[in-house]
Image: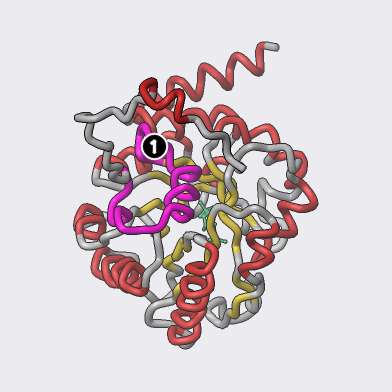
């Protein structure tokens, strides 16, 4: 039986006259989502800057031991404190990442292809129950617009979105680009918009010029950019800066961090560009300072 607290009635404070705060949400296109999805998105994106540095290290699921990522267990753990989010396969997570880490995980959930075959021919290989069991903050698959298996990849992401809705699980849609596709604003606008309209919560695409600002403007959900092939560090920082400047909400970067001369310094330099919009030149100075400090030790 609850206590009869009549005696303290006159001590209660109902805050009469103070309107209850109506919480908005800081991410583009996300205001009408449910609490669980928003909570997960707020783990991935820093609510203060509205941005994220995701470390992508899911390359092995199609490419095997990618250069720079031959030993996930040695390369990734020292980077974790310098990034906001891990993006990887469940196998990499289970085998190489300490479960005590307090960083959200975006779980690669597709399978069915390798670099030896048609990369668009994928299926979903991770159930939503498994993603929840692994405490994922989001699940992801790629969409191959214009490829032979376009329809299948659209079905894959729709499946994740439908199943994810039952668990409050956000979905990241990745715009995969076939060798024969033009990596231009027209293509990326199409791919990003399709992914958003199907109901994904955020999208990963590539930076392109000219017209990246148009890709962002016509996509009603947050965009993060992939890094793509390894570039000289200053060029990678310039690319990240331009993407942020034109409205991207962060990066999901792999090779340009883990295959950098100094991955830890690069993760911090990318973080300065993404969260503080530090100029690429200053971020590169920071990179060199951190790198040189280490080599002096
Ligand atoms: C490809 O295997 C994955 O989708 C990667 O997560 C993506 O390409 C980002 O990694 P990177 O910055 O190396 O392109």
Residue 194 visible in the picture: yes
Lateral position of residue 224 relative to residue 242, left or right: right
The residue at the point 52 percent across, 34 percent down is: 4
- The image shows residue 265 at horizontal and vertical percentages of 56, 27
Looking at the rendering, in which quadrant would you find the N terminus?
top right
Q: Give how far across and how far down residue 231 sits, in percent.
A: 47, 45
Q: Judge by depth and name the residue closer to the eye, 81 or 4.
A: 4
Residue 202 visible somewhere in the drawing = no
Q: Residues within 10 Å of mark 1 (few under 14, many from 20)?
A: some
- Placement of the C terminus among the 4 image quadrants: top right
At 65% from the left edge and 78% from the top edge, which residue is drawn?
112
Residue closest to the eye, 165 or 251: 165
Give the residues drawn in magenta, as a range: 26-51
Q: Which residue sits at x=50%, y=25%?
A: 287
Residue at 69% from the left image edge and 65% from the top image edge: 130
For residue 169, above or below residue 256: below
Furthest toward the right, the residue is: 95
Q: Which residue is mark 1?
A: 47
Quadrant of residue 132 within the rendered picture: bottom right
């Amino acid at each position: 039986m609850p206590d009869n607290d009549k005696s303290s009635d006159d001590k209660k404070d109902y805050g009469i006259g103070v309107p209850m705060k109506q919480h908005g949400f800081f991410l583009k296109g996300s205001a009408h989502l449910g609490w669980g999805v928003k909570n997960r998105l707020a783990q991935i994106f820093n609510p203060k800057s509205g941005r994220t540095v995701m470390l992508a290290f899911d390359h092995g699921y199609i490419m095997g031991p990618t250069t720079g990522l031959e030993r996930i267990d040695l390369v990734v753990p020292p980077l974790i404190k310098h990034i906001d989010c891990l993006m990887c396969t469940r196998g990499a997570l289970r085998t190489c990442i300490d479960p005590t880490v307090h960083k959200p995980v975006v779980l690669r959930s597709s399978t069915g292809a390798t670099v030896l075959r048609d990369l668009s021919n994928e299926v979903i290989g991770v159930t939503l129950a498994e993603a929840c069991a692994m405490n994922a903050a989001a699940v992801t698959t790629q969409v191959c617009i214009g490829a032979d298996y376009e329809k299948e990849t659209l079905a894959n992401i729709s499946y994740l979105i439908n199943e994810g809705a039952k668990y409050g699980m956000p979905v990241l849609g990745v715009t995969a680009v076939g060798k024969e596709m033009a990596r231009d604003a027209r293509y990326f606008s199409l791919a990003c918009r399709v992914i958003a309209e199907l109901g994904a919560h955020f999208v990963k695409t590539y930076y392109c010029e000219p017209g990246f600002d148009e890709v962002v403007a016509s996509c009603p959900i947050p965009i993060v950019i992939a890094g793509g092939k390894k570039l000289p560090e200053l060029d990678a920082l310039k690319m990240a800066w331009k993407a942020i400047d034109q409205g991207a909400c962060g990066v999901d970067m792999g090779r340009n961090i883990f295959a950098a001369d100094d991955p830890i310094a690069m993760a911090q330099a990318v973080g300065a560009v993404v969260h503080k919009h530090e100029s690429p030149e200053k971020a590169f100075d920071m990179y060199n300072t951190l790198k040189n400090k280490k080599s002096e030790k």
